Amino acid sequence: MNKKNIYLLGATGSIGTQTLDVIDNNPDKYELITISFGRQIDKGIEIIKKFKPKFVSTMDSKDALKIKLLFPEIEVGFGDEGLIHAATYDSYNSNENLVVTAVVGSVGLTPTIKAIKKGYNIGLANKETLVTAGHLVMKLAEENHVKILPIDSEHAAIFQCLNGEDPSKVEQLIITASGGSFRDKTREELVYVTIKDALNHPNWSMGAKITIDSATMMNKGLEVIEAHWLFNLPYERISTILHKESVIHSMVEFIDTAVIAQLGTPDMRIPIQYALAYPERIVSKNSRRLNLAEIGKLNFKEMDYNRFPCLKFAYDAGIKGGSMPTVLNAANEAAVGLFLQGKIKFLDIEKLIYQQIESHHIISNPDLETVLALDQEIKAKVSSLQIERS
Amino acid sequence: MNKKNIYLLGATGSIGTQTLDVIDNNPDKYELITISFGRQIDKGIEIIKKFKPKFVSTMDSKDALKIKLLFPEIEVGFGDEGLIHAATYDSYNSNENLVVTAVVGSVGLTPTIKAIKKGYNIGLANKETLVTAGHLVMKLAEENHVKILPIDSEHAAIFQCLNGEDPSKVEQLIITASGGSFRDKTREELVYVTIKDALNHPNWSMGAKITIDSATMMNKGLEVIEAHWLFNLPYERISTILHKESVIHSMVEFIDTAVIAQLGTPDMRIPIQYALAYPERIVSKNSRRLNLAEIGKLNFKEMDYNRFPCLKFAYDAGIKGGSMPTVLNAANEAAVGLFLQGKIKFLDIEKLIYQQIESHHIISNPDLETVLALDQEIKAKVSSLQIERS
């Protein structure tokens, strides 16, 4: 078997680090060709020493220069252009190419689109890409015969449940939700929560933004929109259910009432590896096997849209379509950013998002330029609104 | 789409009746060509009136004659030969042929083998066929390019979980067990249980023999042996787990630790229909959809071999192989028969089985004649032993 070339956007983050773990465990299968990272230069240097990528992109030019001085044999880049170069680097070999987009937020969109146009398959850990521009990305992927392999545990689960099945026989997708850090709190109690509370997810160890998104349930909303695009199903055929153990990662119900589910320990290396190895399955080194007898009980509860309005916003935005999901996503990214900077309270996140989606006039079928401009515009607006409010 | 020809062995039993329900719901897809039944002639006559099969086999010649007088246009047969004829009847059309073997016990073996030799696909609800002669049946099926489609809910679940997957990447099969009617009783309490208690299964409405097998956990043991043959896996890769809700019908764990499960309401029409429609899925009329939020909790518990020695007997018999599973199955059939006739106590079932498997000298790779002779011999022995004991 030929090696696969891996282009890893967001190498120092949670998904990035775990992707490197999978590559490290399977040196005969994967070669890390490029990486990008943001501000964690020390971690970046460690990765470069260990994996010797051919090209490295940093956020700042200063860091790129530092890398060049330390590793003169390595090509470097920075900023948006560097990120694009990391996603589209030419390897000049016949191996399969897989870009793992593990950057956070809509910044992942343009490099993903460029990689698709180049014919590179995508391991998609950046759900904002499909949320903000699913109509463009999926169309391009089809035109370029590119596989979009989901790395989110829920979508990887659904993807596996659909193995060998006829997609036209799907009744609904059932996305499970742990409920996030505040699942046992009432809305009244949410008024007083802190950043530290919010970052303490009960099951998964993840990056800051997705952990906050889990606490607001916006993460599930983004996943619903992502699932709509990935699996080409209308929103009324995508449901969510509270399942606090995160053992069933998601399910597919078929027209004969049979339900296929994918289960496992909460370990992101499993879906990452599945995307990397697809269409094969390979042994997971260091991952724990599921032991249901030890777990004893799996709990399920109906989703409560009043408790989690962000999920409702996402369904509404998805159903309205056009530019609305872009607005939802941009407002959420900006609001979560403000919360993580300590500038707004937890419940302000949903208020800021609501203001934006309520006042937006939908542009139907927006092109890439429109999406990118709108994304910037909404993010700026949310920040300025916040200033007025405080 | 062409219709499928259905040959239904055991039409008046629990699986038979539900198979007719599926056929009745899909008159454009299936045509009932032959049926067999035992002593329930009134039910048999109703079926003949409604479905107008071409050939009917009864247990007794008297009943066959009665059918012939009532329906002169229908061909009739009876006994072992009639059953074989029902399984191998010539339809003289180009439709796919599917024999549903819903008879109980090793009586299903010979007709199944004859149908396979004729190239008819098998919808296998008669697990004793594979338990008693899996090595012969699977080899013949392969040679004749015949599909063996499992109708047991557990095996249908595993079959679905393996859709689109590489069987060489399976780590283990996990067969779920409800625990049967006596799951909450201690072994001490089992001394006093009655036939009526034993026939009261908490989740499934099934025939008498399988309901008793569920109470002794021999049913799970037979399923382990059935799974061994159907999915070509060694016994150390087939495990069982207690799951009292019977919502997860079984699971497959892969080498990457991912687990795929099939779930649904406990409704045998779903696996029956899956086998009938395979490789398609069709809408299940009248079947309830699974509602996990309503169910709330799924429970799992490690299997206890001391509490359920019959399961241990089955694993041991399977691992020893050769003629041992035939002995296990025959002893069990005879012992359950005695219990249902009120001649022995519940815990005598396992004692009678143990006596037979302990004293048997294994014949390796027994041929069909040896299997059939041994089956008769052990059944006769168990009955006579019983008489000595009483």
Image: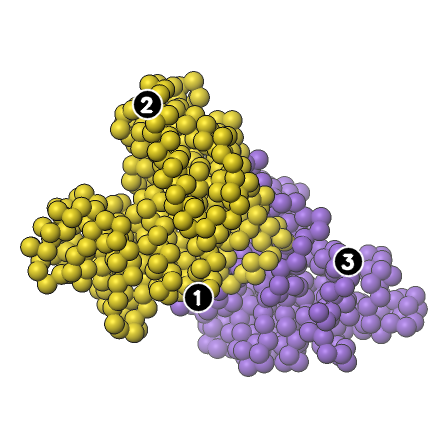
Chain colours: A yellow, B purple
Q: Specify whether residue A326 is in view.
A: yes
Q: Position of residue B125 (x, y in %)?
A: 63, 62
Which amino acid lies under the numbered mark 3 shown in the image of this protein?
A: Asp
Left or right: residue B372 versus residue A130 is: right
Mark 1 and mark 3: Cα distance apart in space: 43 Å
For the point 53% across and 74% down, the residue is: B138
The disc at residue A145 is 1
Label 1 element class: loop
Location of residue A61 with respect to B380 vertically, above or below? above
Tell me the subunit letter for badge 1: A
Location of residue A365 with respect to A218 vertically, above or below? below
Where residue B107 sits, quadrant-wise, is: bottom right
Mark 2 and mark 3: Cα distance apart in space: 68 Å
Mark 1 and mark 2: Cα distance apart in space: 46 Å
Circle 2 Cα neighbour tier, 10 Å, few/some/many (<14 / 14–19 / ≥20): few
Tell me the subunit letter for badge 2: A
* Residue corresponding to mark 3: B24
Left or right: residue A22 versus residue B139 is: left
* Residue corresponding to mark 2: A387
